[in-house]
Amino acid sequence: GYIYPREQRATRDLLRRRFALVRQAVQLMLSIQSSFSRSTGQQLSGNALRQLTPTQLEALFPDLATRYGVLIQFKLWLTLQEQISALEHWVRKDLLRPDLLMHLQSVPGIGPILSMTILLESGAIERFASVGDYASYCRMVESVRLSNGKRKGHGNRKCGNRYLCWAYMEAANHAVRYHPSIHRWYERKRARKHRVVAIKAVAHKLARACYHMLHEGTAFDPTRAFG
């Protein structure tokens, strides 16, 4: 087993706490939207909700008790947003290798949060003997047991790092929408495979590219990754 270096362990764990805070914020937002729908029979989008002030939100609810409960949730949501932003700022300034963030952010679909996640969850890239080992750690390689060319079962699907798996899947979903060459590669793969399999294949490519970038200290090369 790998023991994560003490110097950055707390910083990595702090970024993991962000996931829990984001989940809480999403739950609060969904609850407010549900209350609005039950109270008015209309829909309130997430983008519209984010633009409201507490006073504006109050005016949307005719019932006093419902208004009071929703206002409590909205203030909690605002507090969570403030704390999430503060946490992200803290993690960013506490990184030992902030220079690597710019390399990672040259990858389509990888922004500040995903780049910090990949950097901290990967740890020292030298601990992986090969790019295949890294891809497996990121849960990009299917664990299948074969016998005489036939599938007989799966290995432990929970092996590896779920945070890295999430990060590369998020990046892949963004990249196939906004990067032309990656979109073309994805469409060719999708013509033969299910959409989920095609997205996972893109994520696998991105994980392999990031391994080489972290190992060599270079920027993203789409031709090398998807050429």
Image (tube, helix red, strand yellow):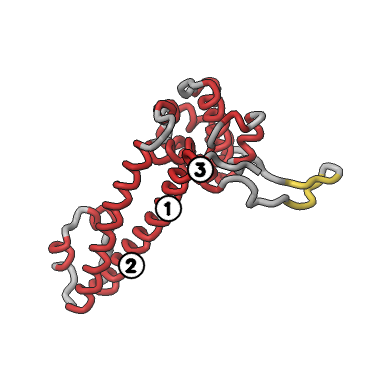
Sort mark 3 into few (<14), some (14-19) or many (20+) by Cα contacts within 10 Å. many
Mark-to-mark CA distance, 1 and 3:
20 Å
Q: Is residue 24 left or right of residue 70?
A: right
Mark-to-mark CA distance, 2 and 3:
27 Å
The amino acid beneath tag 3 is Met
Place residue 142 in its image quadrant. Answer: top right
Sort mark 2 into few (<14), some (14-19) or many (20+) by Cα contacts within 10 Å. some
* Residue beneath the point at 32% across and 68% down: 34
Q: Are marks 2 and 3 in contact (CB under 8 Å)?
A: no
* SS at circle 1: helix
The residue furthest front is 6
* SS at circle 2: helix
The numbered dot on residue 169 is 3
Q: Are marks 1 and 2 in contact (CB under 8 Å)?
A: no
* Residue beneath the point at 58% across and 37% down: 201
Comparing labels 1 and 2, the label whose residue is closer to the camera: 1
Give how far across and how far down residue 48 sits, in percent: 23, 55
* SS at circle 3: helix
* Residue beneath the point at 21% across and 68% down: 71
Give how far across and how far down residue 107 sits, in percent: 44, 29
The amino acid beneath tag 1 is Arg
The amino acid beneath tag 2 is Ser
Q: Nearer the viewer, residue 58 or 186?
A: 58
Q: Nearer the viewer, residue 102 or 3?
A: 3
Q: Classify 36 as above or below 113.
A: below
Q: Earlier in the sequence, mark 1 or mark 3?
A: 1
Please give the residue where the numbered disc 2 appears in the rendered image. Answer: 31
